[in-house]
Image: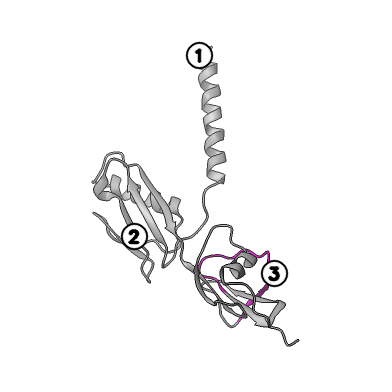
Amino acid sequence: MIKRFMALVMLCLSIAVVAQAEGLSEYKMSSGDLIKIQVYGEEELTIETRLSDAGTISYPLLGELRVLGMTTGQLSTYITDELLNGYLLDPSVSVAILQYREFYIDGAVKSPGGYPYQPGLTLQRAVSLAGGFTERASSSKFYRVKEGEDSSRPVKVNLNSPIQPGDVITIEESFF
């Protein structure tokens, strides 16, 4: 009876782990993101830092780490593995994004410029952050260049399109 109960508990735990893993962030960190790395029980290893323009951070004991393109889960695993290599016996590391890098909006909006990214951001919300459309704004000519893509090939988007950190949005003017 106890063996069946333990098997049932293990099955439930593995289902919970799989469900949790599916919800992990796929957000890839880049220059300008502000992150917090926390090692439970090791205050001197808990830091808040912004990724440099090269996508690196300086971390106690480990030195300069290139974290560009990593997810928070990948960075947590990497630091855990490195700390296990002669520094700590059983480190518990968590990594969180405290502030995302900016997105940029220009063209026919009242206040063009860079704005802090917020999860779930759409073009319509981005325009609102920029003070709304100007009188001459087009009602359909909206373009986005994703960070790291060729800026000579903007992609046409609509008001419901998701916006990501580092994106550059252009709102064209209407001629009528």
Residue indicated by mark 3: 158
Instruction: Say if the magenta span includes residue 117.
Output: no
Foreground of the two, 140 or 29: 140
Q: Earlier in the sequence, mark 2 or mark 1?
A: 1
Foreground of the two, 137 or 13: 137
Q: Nearer the viewer, mark 2 or mark 1?
A: 2
**Mark 3–mark 1 distance (CA, rounded to whole Å):** 58 Å
Q: Quadrant of residue 62?
A: bottom left
The x, y position of residue 173, in whole percent, is 67, 84
Inspect the image, locate mark 3, and give the three-letter code of the amino acid beneath it: Asn
Q: Earlier in the sequence, mark 3 or mark 1?
A: 1
Asked whether, in this view, residue 21 is left or right of residue 57, the answer is right
Residue indicated by mark 2: 49
**Mark 2–mark 1 distance (CA, rounded to whole Å):** 48 Å
Q: Quadrant of the N terminus?
A: top right
The x, y position of residue 139, in whole percent, is 72, 76
Q: Residue at x 68, y 83 (%)?
A: 136
The x, y position of residue 170, in whole percent, is 61, 78
Residue indicated by mark 1: 2
Asked whether, in this view, residue 136 is left or right of residue 130, the answer is right
- Which residues, given as a range, are shown in magenta? 153-168
